Structures are given as C-alpha cells and as structure tokens.
C-alpha cells in the first residue's frame, strides 16, 4: 500500500499531522502484510523440514540425500519401498489432512464468529464418524465406499445443523448450540454401534475414531488430493465473502454482501473439507479447533488468516504423526497426539489472552 | 458479548413481539408446579419399576418392592435389578441436574455441562487409569478415582479459564473445558488402545448405564450426593447475585470468589458421584436447567429444585425407553439421553433466545 498524501506546499501544522498519520497507517499496514507473508513462509518452511525429517527417519534411518535421490527415481529396491510406499504417502496424507482440517476450522470459526464453532466440536466430524462406523461395523463397508460414507455423513450432519439452526438467518451462537446437540446425539450412535459389535471390530473402529494415519497408503491419498484440489479453490473463491462477514451481519449486508448465501457457500466447503479429511484419517482431534487460533495469534489483525491456518494445520498433523510414530514408547494414533499437544497450546493461548472470543 | 450478537438479540426480541418477556410467576404457582413435578417423578419411578425388557406382572412388582419373595422370578427381578436401577436413576439424575444448573449459573454460560466442560472426561480418565494401571475391577475401588478425576479436571478448567486479564469469561471457560475434555478423552483412548481387556470393559461403561453398579455402590455414593445436593440448593441466592455480573454481585456484598469455590465443590461432588453411579452421561445436565428455566424464569432459587426433580424424570424415562425399544436387548441410557435429549434441546435453542446468564 503506497499512498502519497497530497500535501499543501506551505504546510500547516494540521497538514503535517495528517501526513504523519497517513504515513503511520500505511506503515502499520505494510508491517501487517509483511508479517503475514513472513509467517506464511516460515510455516511453509517448517512443513518442508518436518516432511523431510519424517521421510528420512524411522526404523531404518536414511540420509536426506538418499531420500531425495529415491524421490527422483534413484535408490535401491529397499529404500524405494520404505520411502515411496511407506513414508511418502503417510507424510503427504498428514499434510493434506492437516490442510483440510485447518482450513475447515478457520472458515467455521470466522464465519460463525465463534471460537467454539470448529467442525470437530459442532458435530460435523461426529456425523462423518457415525455414518462411517455404522457402515463399517453393521454393513461391512470398506475402502472408497467407506470414505464416501464419511463424506456423506459430514454433509448430512452439516445440512441438518444448518437447517435446524435456521431462523431468519443463522446466528453463530445458535448454530454452535444446535451443532453440539447434534454432535452429542451422533456420538452416542457411534458408541452404541461399538458396544453392539464384536470386540475386534470395535477395537478397530476405536483406533480409527482416535484419528490414525497407520497403514495409510496411496489408496487413501488420491481421493483426498482430488477433493482438496476441488475444495480449496472453491473455499478461496467463497472467502472473499468472509471479510465483510467479520463486521457482523448487519454491517455486511449494508456493504452489499449476500450474507446468508456467502455464509452457506463457505460453510458447505468447510463441511466437505472436514468430511474428506475424516474419511482419510478418522476424526483427528483438535486440529480444526486449534489451527486457526494459532494462526491468528501469529498474524494478528489479518482477519481469517486462511493460508496460515491451513499451513498450521498441516504442521500440527505432520509433527503429531512423527511424534506418534517415534517419540512414544508405544505407537499411538495421531489424533491422540494432536489433542495432547494441541490442547495445552490452546490453553496457553487462553491463559495469555487479554480478550478471547471477539472475532472467533 | 459482541455488538452483532446484541443486535441479533434485539431483532429476535422484536420478532417475537415481546412474547419472550420474562414472566414472573408467583411463588404459590411455582411451589404447586414443583409438587406436580414431584408427582411426575414418582409416577416415572413406578413405571421404571414396572416396565422392563422382561414382563413382570404388576402384582409381583408391588410385592417385589414391599414384601419380596425371592422364590418368585418376577419379584426377584424387581428386587435385584429394577430397584437398584431406579434408585441409580434418581441419584444420578438429581446430581446431574443440579450440577448442570450450578455450572451454568457460575459460568454464566448456557453451554456449561459436565460433559462439555471436561468434568466427565476427568472422571472417566481417572476410572480408566485405575482399571488399567491398578487393576481395579470393583466400583467401590474406583469410586474415589472418579471423584479425584472430576476434581482435577474442574480445577484445571477453572484455573486455565480464569487466567488472563478478564478472569473466567464464559467463552474462555467453555474453550478451556472443550480443550480439557478433548485431551482427557484422548488420553483415555491412548490407554485403552494399549489394552484390549480394559477397552472391552470401558466401551460399555462409557455408554452410561444405570445397571452397571450394585446396590452397595449406591449406598456408598448417596452421602456424597446428599452433601452435594444441600450445597447446590443453598447456592440459589448467590447464583442470582452472580447472574448480575461479578461487579454488581460484589456491590451487593457477595464474596464472588467464595461462591465460585463452593459451587465448584458442589459440582465436583455431584458430577463425580453421578459418573461413578452411571458412567458419563451427557445432555441431562445441559438440557434440564434450560427446561426448568422455561417454567420458572431466571430465579435460581427455583431453577435448582426444578432441575433436581426434572433431571431424574428425564433419565428414568430415557432408561425405560432404552429397555423397551430394542427388546429383548436393551439400549444403554446414555445413548437414549443423547438421542432424545437432542430434540427438546434443539427445539429450545430454536424457540427462544436462551435465557441470558
């Protein structure tokens, strides 16, 4: 933003104050933008570093040079198997799942202006889980059909919540309440199905419900990649409706924003994002909830900070999955780790915040 | 309270044509209503004794309660299964209703609920730890862990929620609760994933059921529930003062910190006890106080006793539904409360602006 204010030649004190003010404002704006870009790049770099580490580290530690060579078609059969078939899909999946959850949570929290309104809390993930668990345990569905059922579940839950909360528009608070209600109802279905099924099946479902990237392969990667390829641009397109929405419904309508339709488009994208991510890795806890607040804390005053939130989500899931595989005495599902590292950070943010709750 | 939400409220109030203006009901009417609610509770308890997944003639039900002859199968069922089950419903229900009300009052937060603020999760994780790490199998052994877990979770949530500049604002408290609940649930999962046997025990306990405990446990828990009930019912005037906001409450000469401490104590005792009796049951503590407020208006001196009576009604009705819905099997009560609790709750949320707390 470069604005050269028009300054009268014989500048009075008033004019000087004005130019001074304008200069200060544009300096602040520039700083904000610079910081936003800087933070985004920093997060991206961190994702790349952790990605590299998770490719080279494991039961068989591989120097980074060898990993890169393997990625570009070199390497022997063993290293090709380890990197290309085991580690690469898992790490990529972690990144994609993190992007999906981070973006989804950021959109929900911003659109509904409520920090509690993340998909994992208002029943969207629960919808995906309920349909998927029911399909898997009662109807022995698996594979791509299972992913489809999780996506269906999230969309149906999202639509139900939206319709139930609709009353001359949807208010953030009401939608969150309705969502929590729907989520609890759906969770109880999950538990009931699990209590009715065989121990081993229930155990398996329980592992999936904790959010896990274990034994993930290219099979889970492609649907998610294609879905993200569609949904991320759509979300970005819809996101220019976000900015007026943050001012509140009335102000946004005054600015000529199509409040309800813009909101609906955004929420639909975010719901689908949460659904496809849940389909791929189970309801990985806390990523959607925590990514946006962290991103906003890193880039204050930039509104929704969607790209930063997506990158934060990716980083959280990558680090958590690495930790889940290598840093604990037992193999844990990634969702357990995201919760255990994500939640305290949120608590820390809360504890240090002067005001939480404005603007989500 | 953001400006937009304020505008929203204004719009809603005008849209309802002032229908939502708080009605002041007179005390005799409220007292009569409470008696009526007690009558409903009595009938529900009788139904809970009479209806089950097996058929027992009503004659045997009456004899089974008053003068049990254990040679008769029906009377044995009533004596051994249905009475403990009904008592468990009464105890756990009353505890959950009161705990939910006190939490909503203290947090000034319509979303406050033992499940949402992580207190149930605290009790669960402690119970799971005691099962897996210490090999406890008897409820009397892990009862204390349930309390301890509830207490620690409550302290953590409240401590974190009240750090920072503005103290425990409703949003911060709810966020802290959600965060804590998620962590504790994850820890529970992590422990259970390592240990197949415990998971098998836990997946039934987690549903919340009134059949899970013998009458011995009920005897042990009832003193706690009594103490918690007395504490909670005594808090009415203080919660009324708190609902005006901390500053006004202080201006009225209330000691805000002390009120919060006593409330937290009551909530922990009640939630811990309810979790021990029936496992983690959601929704009752959340939905019942709102239903009670519909009848009484915002005066906590009335909301508390109404919640205490209405919550066991809800829990017992849910349990009865669970017994007959999937005969010959049963659906655990926690599933039913969540499933049927959804509907009135959502209706409540839609129908009116939630009473400002």
Image (spheres, rainbow, N blue to C red):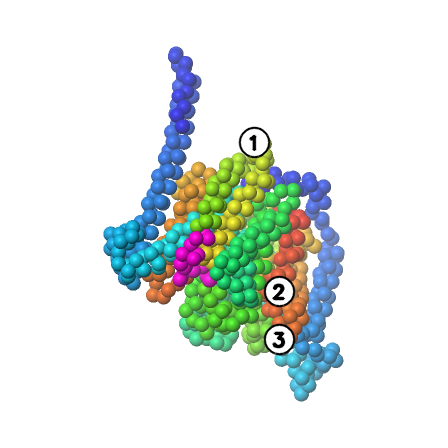
Residue A98 in percent (x, y) is at 42, 51
The residue lying toward the viewer, choosing from A147 and B267, is: A147
- CA gap, disc 1 to disc 3? 62 Å
Per the rendering, the mark at residue A89 is: none
Quadrant of res A325: bottom left
Pick out the residue farthest to the top.
Answer: A10
Question: In this orientation, does residue B258 appear?
Answer: no
The residue lying toward the viewer, choosing from B336 and A198, is: A198
Q: Earlier in the sequence, mark 2 or mark 3?
A: 3
- CA gap, disc 2 to disc 3? 19 Å
Q: Which residue is mark 3?
A: B84
- CA gap, disc 1 to disc 2? 46 Å
Q: Residue at x 68, y 82 (%)?
A: B74
Side of B42 where A199 appears, left or right: left
| Mark 2: secondary structure | helix
Q: Residues within 10 Å of mark 3 (few under 14, many from 20)?
A: many
Q: Which residue is mark 2?
A: B336
**Disc 3: host chain:** B
- Residue range in magenta is A208-224
């Amino acid at each position: 933003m470069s604005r050269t204010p028009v300054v009268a030649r014989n500048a009075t004190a008033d004019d000087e104050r004005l130019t001074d003010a304008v200069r200060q404002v544009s300096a602040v704006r520039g700083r904000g933008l610079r910081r936003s870009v800087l933070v985004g790049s920093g997060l991206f770099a961190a994702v790349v570093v952790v990605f590299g580490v998770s490719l080279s580290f494991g039961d068989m530690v591989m120097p980074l040079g060898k990993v890169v060579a393997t990625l570009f078609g070199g390497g022997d059969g063993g290293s090709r198997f380890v990197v290309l078939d085991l580690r690469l899909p898992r790490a990529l999946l972690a990144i994609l799942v993190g992007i999906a959850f981070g973006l989804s949570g950021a959109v929900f929290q911003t659109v509904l202006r409520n920090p509690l309104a993340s998909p994992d809390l208002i029943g969207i993930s629960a919808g995906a889980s309920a349909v998927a668990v029911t399909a898997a345990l009662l109807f022995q569905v698996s594979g791509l059909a299972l992913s489809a059922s999780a996506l269906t579940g999230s969309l149906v839950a999202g639509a139900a919540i939206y319709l139930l909360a609709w009353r001359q528009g949807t208010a953030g608070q009401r939608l969150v309440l309705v969502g929590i209600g729907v989520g609890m109802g759906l969770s109880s279905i999950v538990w009931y199905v699990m209590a009715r099924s065989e121990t081993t099946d229930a155990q398996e479902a329980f592992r999936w419900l904790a959010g896990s990237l274990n034994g993930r392969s290219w099979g889970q990667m492609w649907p998610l990649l294609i879905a993200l390829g569609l949904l991320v641009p759509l979300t970005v397109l819809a996101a220019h409706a976000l900015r007026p929405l943050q001012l509140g419904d009335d102000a946004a309508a005054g600015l000529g924003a199509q409040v309800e339709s813009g909101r609906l488009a955004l929420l639909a994208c975010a719901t689908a994002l949460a659904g496809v991510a849940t389909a791929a890795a189970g309801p990985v806890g806390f990523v959607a909830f925590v990514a946006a607040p962290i991103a906003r804390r890193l880039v204050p005053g930039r509104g929704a900070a969607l790209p930063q939130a997506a990158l934060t989500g990716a980083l959280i899931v990558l680090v958590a999955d690495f930790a889940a595989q290598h840093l604990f005495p037992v193999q844990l599902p990634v969702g357990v780790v995201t919760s255990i590292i994500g939640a305290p950070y949120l608590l820390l943010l809360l504890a240090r915040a002067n005001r939480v709750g404005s603007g989500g | 309270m953001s400006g937009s939400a304020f505008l929203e409220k204004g719009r809603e109030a005008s849209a309802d044509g002032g229908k939502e203006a708080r009605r002041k009901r007179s005390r005799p009417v409220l007292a009569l209503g409470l008696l009526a609610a007690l009558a409903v509770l009595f009938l529900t308890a009788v139904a809970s004794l009479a209806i089950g997944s097996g058929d027992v003639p009503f004659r045997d039900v009456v004899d089974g309660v008053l003068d049990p002859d254990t040679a008769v199968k029906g009377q044995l069922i009533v004596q051994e299964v249905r009475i403990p089950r009904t008592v468990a419903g009464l105890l756990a229900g009353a505890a959950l209703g009161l705990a939910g009300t006190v939490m909503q009052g203290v947090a000034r937060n319509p979303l406050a609920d033992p499940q949402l603020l992580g207190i149930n999760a605290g009790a669960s994780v402690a119970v799971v730890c005691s099962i897996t790490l210490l090999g406890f199998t008897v409820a009397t052994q892990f009862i204390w862990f349930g309390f301890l877990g509830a207490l620690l979770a409550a302290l953590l949530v409240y401590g974190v929620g009240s750090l920072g500049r503005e103290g425990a604002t409703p949003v911060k408290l709810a966020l802290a609760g959600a965060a804590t609940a998620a962590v504790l649930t994850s820890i529970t999962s992590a422990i259970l994933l390592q240990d197949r046997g415990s998971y098998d025990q836990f997946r039934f306990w987690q549903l919340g059921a009134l059949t899970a405990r013998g009458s011995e446990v009920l005897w042990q828990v009832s003193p706690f529930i009594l103490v918690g009930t007395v504490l909670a019912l005594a808090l009415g005037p203080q919660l009324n003062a708190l609902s005006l906001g901390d500053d006004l409450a202080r201006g009225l000469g209330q000691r805000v910190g002390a009120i919060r401490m006593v409330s937290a104590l009551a909530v922990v005792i009640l939630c811990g006890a309810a979790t021990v009796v029936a496992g983690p049951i959601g929704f009752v503590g959340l939905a019942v106080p709102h239903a009670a407020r519909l009848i009484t208006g915002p005066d906590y001196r009335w909301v508390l006793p109404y919640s205490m009576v209405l919550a066991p009604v809800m829990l017992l009705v849910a349990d009865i539904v669970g017994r007959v819905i999937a005969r010959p099997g049963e659906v655990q009560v926690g599933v039913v409360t969540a499933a049927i609790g959804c509907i009135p709750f959502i209706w409540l949320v839609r129908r009116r602006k939630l009473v400002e707390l």
